[in-house]
Image (cartoon, rainbow, N blue to C red):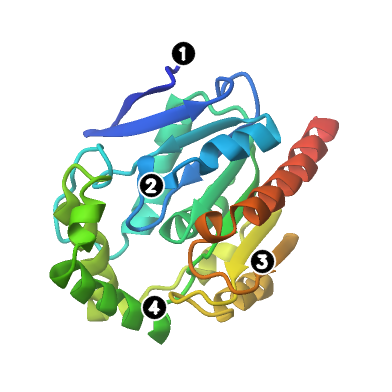
């Protein structure tokens, strides 16, 4: 199936919006981008375009169910929603787009999904993962910040601003926020997947991330047996691709050049 530049894919019962920049995923190495807990295709902004220009790869961006213009989801979300996304939805999506080989690049929730996929599915097509501000455990600072943004959403113009990017903004916000603030979610822990990751990992973390500490990075380094390259960005918060786009693009492009060329030389 040849993909258009924009469109939607039917995965199970959901319609997922997508955007493709560059070659078809079946014809070239592909970078599949996984957005944050309140993200969407549109909220990536120009970052996918800059990444495509820097790498020459195919770049595929999509909105998970409940986000952007994709189908809404039933609330409350199950507390293992990231595991379900990684192990049930993402494999079908990669097959549907004709993914031949390439990278997963995830931010926040998307980074967690990428890590779960890499450890939970031994996919020979996957050459590496880039984890931007990843979560592998729940920290106090995460819960505190997520509780604060709930109050902001309900008392300021944040809801109106987010509604520009989500067809059903309450479905997007409360699906994410409600799961993270559920007391049982404090037990969420995906470190068990890390030991099974068999591809290189690049972690990009802001030193001032308000949603997670460097403990997240340390756990990834401790638990992974594969190479882990860490880029700490001073003075940057939870969104390096927005706050330090040039440094973030360069880090990913350098990682892509090393991992994809290495894979090509071994094939």
Q: Residue under circle 2?
A: 43
Q: In the rendering, which numbered label is found on residue 2?
A: 1
Task: Give whichever of discs 3 and 2 has the lower sequence position.
Answer: 2
Task: Give whichever of discs 1 and 4 has the lower sequence position.
Answer: 1
Q: What element carries label 3?
A: loop
Task: Give whichever of discs 1 and 2 has the lower sequence position.
Answer: 1
Q: Residue furthest top?
A: 2
Q: What element carries label 1?
A: loop
Q: Residue under circle 3?
A: 224
Neighbour class for label 2 at 10 Å: few (<14), some, many (≥20)? some
Please name which of the two marks, 3 or 2, marks the residue nearer to the observer: 2
Q: What element carries label 4?
A: helix
Task: Give whichever of discs 2 and 4 has the lower sequence position.
Answer: 2
The answer to whether mark 1 and mark 3 are in CB contact below 8 A is: no
Q: Residue at x 65, y 23 (%)?
A: 28
Neighbour class for label 3 at 10 Å: few (<14), some, many (≥20)? many
Query: CA gap, disc 1 to disc 3?
Result: 36 Å
The answer to whether mark 1 and mark 2 are in CB contact below 8 A is: no
Query: CA gap, disc 3 to disc 4?
Result: 23 Å
Query: CA gap, disc 3 to disc 2?
Result: 30 Å
Query: CA gap, disc 1 to disc 4?
Result: 40 Å
Q: Name the quadrant of the N terminus.
A: top left
Please name which of the two marks, 1 or 3, marks the residue nearer to the observer: 1
Task: Give whichever of discs 1 and 3 has the lower sequence position.
Answer: 1
Asked if residue 199 can be seen in this view, the reply is no
Q: In the rendering, which numbered label is found on residue 142?
A: 4
Q: Which of 1 and 254 is in front in this view?
A: 254
Task: Give whichever of discs 3 and 4 has the lower sequence position.
Answer: 4
Whole-percent x and y of residue 92? 41, 34
Kindly indicate the quadrant of the structure image that contains residue 83. bottom left
Q: Which residue is drawn at 68% across and 37% down?
A: 54
């Amino acid at each position: 199936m040849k993909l258009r530049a924009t469109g939607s894919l039917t995965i199970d019962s959901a319609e997922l919006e997508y955007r493709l920049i560059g070659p078809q995923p079946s014809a070239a190495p592909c970078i599949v981008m996984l957005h944050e807990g309140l993200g969407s295709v549109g909220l990536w902004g120009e970052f996918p375009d800059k990444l495509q220009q820097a790498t020459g790869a195919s770049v595929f961006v999509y909105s998970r169910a409940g986000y952007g213009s994709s189908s809404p989801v039933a609330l409350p979300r199950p507390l293992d929603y990231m595991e379900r996304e990684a192990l049930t939805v993402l494999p079908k999506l990669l097959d549907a787009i004709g993914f031949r080989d390439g990278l997963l690049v995830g931010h926040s929730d998307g980074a967690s999904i990428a890590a779960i996929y890499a450890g939970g599915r031994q996919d020979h097509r996957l050459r590496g993962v880039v984890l931007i501000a990843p979560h592998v455990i729940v920290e106090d600072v995460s819960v505190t910040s997520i509780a604060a943004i709930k109050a902001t959403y309900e008392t300021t113009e944040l809801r109106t601003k987010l509604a520009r990017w989500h067809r059903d903004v309450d479905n997007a916000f409360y699906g994410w926020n409600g799961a993270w603030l559920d007391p049982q979610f404090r037990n969420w822990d995906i470190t068990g997947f890390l030991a099974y990751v068999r591809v290189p990992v690049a972690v990009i973390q802001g030193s001032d991330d308000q949603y997670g500490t460097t403990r997240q990075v340390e756990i990834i380094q401790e638990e992974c047996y594969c190479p882990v390259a860490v880029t700490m960005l001073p003075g940057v918060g939870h969104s390096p691709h927005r706050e330090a786009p040039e440094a973030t693009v360069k880090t990913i492009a350098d990682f892509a050049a090393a991992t994809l060329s290495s894979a090509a030389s071994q094939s």
